[in-house]
Image (cartoon, rainbow, N blue to C red):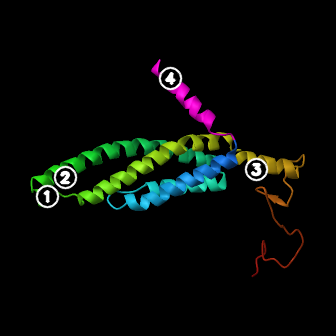
Amino acid sequence: QELLAMTEVVAQVLAFVGEDPEINATWVLRFTSIQFGISFFTSITRTESNAALALLGLYSAYGRKKEATKLYFVFLLLSIVTDFIWMIMYGNQIAGAETQEVQNEWQDYAFPPIGTAKFVLGMSVISFVVKILSTPFVFKLYTNLVGDEDHVMSARNAYGSSSSGVRPSFVVGGVGSYQSTGDTGSYQNKDEL
């Protein structure tokens, strides 16, 4: 019954987010930009992988890359779980540090100043909320993007292909190129330089 309720909540959230990949990509760019900016502040006292995660998100949304978006979505979910665990542990450390400070045993406690620690924890909470808010947009972007392999297939279909399976010389990987067929003085396949 709880699983059914959770499924309904997820369905309602996903229904709220539109199907247009351009709009979803714009929202993902906004969320990942915020995550990237916040990571500068949270790196004051914690080892920070959120900057790299945000850059992956920026790359996937800006380039509209389906496989990169899938990778970003998986890492985003893992990051949400690890951030939640980190915030609980760090919050407990702050409480322990405050106790040590009150008991005047602060000099023996290896921890950043309490104000700095609270600031970083607060920024981490904001980053955590931004990640949760971005999750449905990233999922919808992934599900509505055309696959990277589909772009190659559509380029092949646009330029056609011969019955022998040889692609025209002007199409290489879906990008136009120039290939010389005559003797133009090229040193390719020649023994002399």
Question: Which picture quadrant has residue 150?
Answer: top right
Magenta span main SS: helix
Where 174 sits versus 180, above or below? above
Q: Which of marks 3 and 1 is nearer the N terminus?
A: 1
Residue positioned 63% across, 33% down in the render: 15
Q: What residue type is labelled 2?
A: Ala
In front: 3, or 103? 103
Q: Which label's residue is closer to the chain start, 1 or 4?
A: 4
Residue that numbered label 4 is attached to: 5
Q: Is mark 2 in CB contact (under 8 Å) with mark 1?
A: yes
User: Residue 106 has which mark?
Assistant: 1
Q: What amino acid type is highlighted by mark number 3?
A: Val
What's the CA distance linking mark 2 and mark 3?
Answer: 57 Å
Viewer-nearest residue: 81 or 68: 81
Pointer 3 residue: 152
Residue type at the position of mark 4: Ala
Does the stretch in magenta take in 3?
A: yes
Query: Closer to the N terminus: mark 2 or mark 3?
Result: 2
State the image coordinates of residue 90 (x, y, percent, origin top left): 29, 48
Quick one: SS at disc 2?
helix
Residue at disc 3, secondary structure: helix
Of all residues, the one furthest to the bottom in this rendering is 193
Q: What is the x, y in percent for residue 127?
A: 44, 50
